[in-house]
Amino acid sequence: MYPITRLRRLRRTPELRDLVRETSISAKDFIAPLFVCHGENIKNEIPAMPGQYHFSVDKVVEECRELYECGVSGVMLFGIPAVKDATGSEAYHDHGIVQQAIRAIKAAVPQLIVIADVCMCEYTDHGHCGIIHDHYVDNDATLKILSRQAVSYAQAGVDMVAPSDMMDGRILAMRKALDENGFVNLPIMAYSAKFSSAFYGPFREAANSAPSFGDRRSYQMDPANSDEAMREIEADIEEGADIVMVKPALPYLDIIQRATSRFDVPMAAYNVSGEYSMIKAAAEKGWIDEDRIVMESLIAIKRAGAKIIITYFAKEVAKKLMNK
Ligand code: PBG
């Protein structure tokens, strides 16, 4: 009790504050999302995401080298296909853009962890995360396609698959398909509690993946639900998920914290496109101190309990941490 206790004593100098700091971040915590497109020598900035690009395979390899050199653990690949169709067929073709990128990155930077997002929405002409029957995303028909996509990425040499579709039963379906094809050691990072969020807006512009009708509320979660998020995470763990994820990150820190106090599986959080672009936009206007806001945001995600942070800030922050 005051005046015996004075919490400010340990805040007096930077050294004391360093000594008692409870949470730290390092480049090893980060996974950098990257968008890959067809073509050569392409590095086009995404208008809604300043500092993020569409990379052709040759350029994505360069980016991966740089990320590896600044200590970032891995990358998460998203594909911009040449053509989109009703069943998203480029997603599971051996020559698909993500398959090409996986091969090239693993050949050039073998120690960088390459994770591939498994979902249909970038590849379907209707922009939904699965196969449509009667204007409804057909859960069980979609599981077959997602499993094929996961196996195809595995055959290309990916280190981990990350299903983001939110179909029921996808982790079990994918685990079985991977095992049957000899990939018993390939981990699955499940986007377990993925909320139907307006924070994905800039990503949908980047991936041209906004649904052409309706929205994703019949498969992604209602932002109002926390108990249901625990059920989603629990189901994914039972189905064999090796890592579980909460997405978006900053508006859902309560979900991250609740899940980490309840489950022992490594927790990832996805600091999504809208979280990134809002900071970039406000910084461009001179309204905020970008560096401090970014550090504070990432520390908050870690403090809530995430071990792994998927963030578009990965490279910038990793570089800053290196120069310290
Ligand atoms: C694909 C997918 C999305 C994101 C990651 N995987 C978009 C969506 O569900 O609409 C969003 C990532 C971001 O906003 O940074 N289903």
Image (spheres, grey):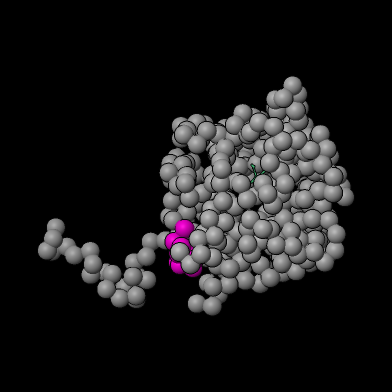
Q: Is residue 316 above or below residue 211?
A: below
Residue in the image at 46% along x and 42% along y: 255
Residue in the image at 62% along x and 42% along y: 190
Which residues fall within the magenta stretch?
288-297
User: What is the count of numbered marks?
Assistant: 0
Q: Is residue 292 magenta?
A: yes
Residue 14, image x and y in percent? 34, 75
Q: Which quarter shows the N terminus? A: bottom left
Q: Is residue 221 magenta?
A: no
Residue 186, image x and y in percent? 71, 47
Residue 260, image x and y in percent? 46, 45
Residue in the image at 63% along x and 34% along y: 216
Would you say the magenta stretch is mainly helix, strand or loop?
helix
Residue 223, image x and y in percent? 50, 36
Which residue is situated farthest in the left direction here? 3
Instruction: State left or right for residue 147 relative to residue 301.
Output: right
Which residue is situated farthest in the top direction here? 134
Which residue is situated farthest in the front direction here? 285
Residue in the image at 45% along x and 64% along y: 288
Q: Is residue 201 visible?
A: yes
| Location of residue 236 by image quarter | top right
Q: Nearer the viewer, residue 175 or 3?
A: 3
Q: Nearer the viewer, residue 39 or 68?
A: 39
Where in the image, quadrant-wise, is ligand 1 located?
top right
Instruction: State left or right for residue 53 relative to residue 226.
Output: right
Q: Is residue 187 visible?
A: no
Q: Is residue 109 above or below residue 199?
A: below
